[in-house]
Image (cartoon, helix red, strand yellow):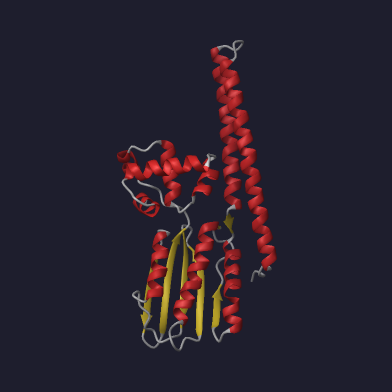
């Protein structure tokens, strides 16, 4: 069993990862600025033949692409969280409920070698489980809850089961709120209840952001940059995150989002994300 990380260690790790991401983005910006300046210098050179200029420019661009892929892989590793660590943080989240209440919470550990979770998925999954546990204990007679995480390679699979009366249903307000949250993440939530035996919630959350339909994008007449922004909006990213990912300013992101709303015919960002999915 993995030992839980102290709260201050988890916070320090998050701050270090954020600082490293900031450094990487700054280095990447400088590197690409240098690459572009070098390309312009080669193309403007009066002492270099067209053939030599094309070859040099091609080599510079190829090297820059290799560097970009390497940085992208590193950035992804910094924004992901090992599934076992994410589960330990969930245990920490629920510890006060276990310690100061009469609830017995059993945790079924995920495989330690399971696929790492994108940071936003790990955060949302913990919030969903907390909400699910609270929805279950709203019922009378619930003394035990079992929480289980698993991963099929593409989705985080969550099961939360209680020993209550077995009368939970999707129309309960707290369950409806959870279902809305799961759907906003392109996931699925199912509720099964057996009278006298308890209720169970099953949640499936995709680990990868949904891809916008290429056919629809063509019909909307989107530019390549607008497609990039749309894909990130559909994944739930905010303007600051989109700007950092695409190496553009937040004002430019706002400009693209405004154009997308107009072209797609959406009135809100949530509607835009929904249409993109």
Occupied quadrant, residue 23: top right
Q: x and y percent of residue 120 in the render?
A: 52, 58
Residue at 56%, 28% in the rendered image? 61
In the visual, does 196 lie left or right of 18?
A: left
At which x and y percent is residue 18?
63, 52
- From this viewpoint, is residue 151 visible? yes
Decide which of 37, 82 is in the foreground and name it. Answer: 37
- Residue 42: image location, x then y, percent: 59, 19
Q: Depth check: 84 or 28 in front?
A: 28
Q: Is residue 118 visible?
A: no
Q: Position of residue 121 (x, y in %)?
A: 50, 59
Query: Residue 86, located in which quarter of the rendered image?
Result: bottom right
Find residue 1 and report its image quarter.
bottom right
Q: Which residue is at 46% across, 48% downward?
A: 232
Residue occupying the point 53% across, 48% down: 240
Which is more toward the observer, 103 or 204? 103
48 or 245, which is in the foreground? Answer: 245
- Horizontally, residue 267 falls left or right of residue 249, namely left
Q: How many tags in the picture?
A: 0
| Left or right position of 227 against 264 | right
Q: Is residue 68 above or below residue 200?
A: above
Position of residue 20 relative to residue 167, above or below, is above
| Residue ID at (32%, 40%) | 220
């Amino acid at each position: 069993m993995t030992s839980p990380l102290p709260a201050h260690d988890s916070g320090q790790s998050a701050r270090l990862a954020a600082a490293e991401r900031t450094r990487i983005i700054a280095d990447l910006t400088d590197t690409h600025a240098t690459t572009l300046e070098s390309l312009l210098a080669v193309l403007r050179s009066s002492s270099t033949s067209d053939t030599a200029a094309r070859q040099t420019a091609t080599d510079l661009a190829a090297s820059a692409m290799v560097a970009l892929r390497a940085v992208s892989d590193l950035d992804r590793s910094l924004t992901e969280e090992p599934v076992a660590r994410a589960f330990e943080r969930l245990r920490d989240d629920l510890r006060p409920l276990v310690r100061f209440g009469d609830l017995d919470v059993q945790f079924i550990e995920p495989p330690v070698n399971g696929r790492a979770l994108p940071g936003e998925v790990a955060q949302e999954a913990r919030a969903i489980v907390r909400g699910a546990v609270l929805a279950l204990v709203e019922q009378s007679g619930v003394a035990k809850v079992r929480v289980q995480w698993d991963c099929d390679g593409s989705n985080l699979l969550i099961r939360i089961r209680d020993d209550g009366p077995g009368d939970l249903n999707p129309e309960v307000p707290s369950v409806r709120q959870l279902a809305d949250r799961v759907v906003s993440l392109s996931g699925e939530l199912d509720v099964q209840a057996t009278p006298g035996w308890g209720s169970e919630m099953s949640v499936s959350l995709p680990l990868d952001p949904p891809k916008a339909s290429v056919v629809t994008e063509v019909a909307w007449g989107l530019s390549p940059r607008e497609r990039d922004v749309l894909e990130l909006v559909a994944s739930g990213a905010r303007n600051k995150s989109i700007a950092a990912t695409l190496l553009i300013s937040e004002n430019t992101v706002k400009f693209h989002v405004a154009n997308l709303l107009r072209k797609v015919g959406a009135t809100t960002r949530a509607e835009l994300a929904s249409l993109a999915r």
